[in-house]
Image (spheres, grey):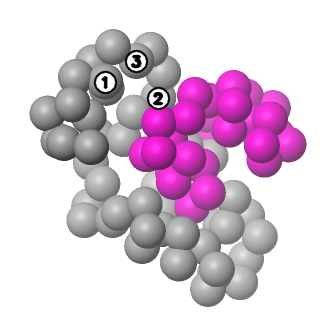
């Protein structure tokens, strides 16, 4: 998918978006997720990865079995 198409898709979306990825890609986050030992940190990384992949917050909350407000706190906190 081209970058222009992704940017257009992001404009149309109403949900959480990653504004500063700090050089992390979805693939790198996925591999990092497997190496992290703390379960709470794994959830944080998973939240960021799912949002970067284009999932809505409610979908991510269902996948990770957390409340959407908890998800927002996980997403807003710093890695």
The residue mark sitting in front, 2 or 1, is: 1
In the image, residue 78 above or below residue 50: below
Are discs 3 and 1 less than 8 Å apart at CB? Answer: yes
Tell whether position 55 is magenta.
yes
- At mark 2, the secondary structure is loop
Callout 1: few (<14), some (14-19), or many (20+) C-alpha neighbours within 10 Å? few
**Is residue 77 in view?**
no
Callout 3: few (<14), some (14-19), or many (20+) C-alpha neighbours within 10 Å? few
Marks 2/3: CA distance?
8 Å
Q: Which residues are magenta?
A: 45-73
In the image, residue 47 above or below residue 17: below
Residue 56 location, quadrant:
top right
Disc on res. 9: 1
Q: Is 3 positioned to the left or the right of 31 in the image?
A: left
The residue mark sitting in front, 2 or 3, is: 3
- At mark 3, the secondary structure is loop
Q: Which residue is mark 2?
A: 16
In the image, residue 35 above or below residue 8: below
- At mark 1, the secondary structure is helix
Q: Which residue is mark 3?
A: 13
């Amino acid at each position: 998918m081209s970058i222009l198409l992704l940017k257009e898709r992001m404009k149309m979306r109403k949900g959480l978006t990653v504004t500063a990825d700090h050089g992390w890609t979805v693939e790198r986050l996925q591999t990092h997720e497997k190496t992290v030992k703390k379960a709470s940190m794994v959830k944080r990384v998973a939240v960021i990865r799912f949002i970067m992949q284009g999932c809505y917050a409610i979908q991510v909350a269902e996948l990770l079995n957390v409340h959407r407000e908890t998800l927002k706190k996980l997403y807003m906190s710093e890695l």
